[in-house]
Amino acid sequence: MPFVDAKITVPVSRDKRDAIKSGLGKAVSAFGKGESYLMVGIDDEYSLWLGGRELEKGAFVSVSLIGDTPDEGCSKFTTDLCELLERELGIPGDCVYVTYHPMMRTRWGWNGDTF
């Protein structure tokens, strides 16, 4: 189950949240997953600074996944994510930062147990 945790500097309307969630549902195919396995968190109007200056439009996105994160999957997801955030929110790709966090199945819990 991928979890995409997005911290975004601009306000995100309900319609835009739905569009981003749906776009991420397609983008997780880079990891062989579909939207039914995806959890998304959106924290908008979040303050981010880079190089000593506050970003007017920017995003920091953390992606946690069970198992390994192949380089080509991370690259494809990053491309799709940056295109999505630019299209939906006007955030340029050079202001979007993404980190990947692979987790062992025994380190990810759900429903009273681990995977």
Image (spheres, rainbow, N blue to C red):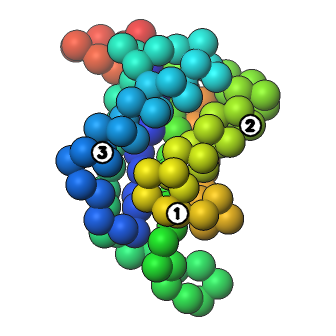
Residue in the foreground of this view, choosing between 16 and 109: 16
Element type at mark 1: loop
Where in the figure is residue 16, as x and y percent of width and height?
Answer: 31, 48
The image shows residue 84, relative to residue 109, as above or below, that is: below
Disc 1 marks which residue? 91
Q: Quadrant of residue 115?
A: top left
Amino acid type assigned to the residue bearing label 1 in the image: Ile
Amino acid type assigned to the residue bearing label 3 in the image: Arg
Which labelled disc corresponds to residue 75?
2
Residue visible at 46% across and 79% down? 56
Residue in the foreground of this view, choosing between 113 and 16: 16
Q: CA distance from mark 2 to mark 1?
A: 18 Å
Where in the figure is residue 71, as x and y percent of width and height?
Answer: 78, 31
Residue visible at 29% across and 38% down? 18
Disc 3 marks which residue? 17
Amino acid type assigned to the residue bearing label 2 in the image: Ser
Going from N to C along the chain, the mark reached first, 3 or 1, is 3
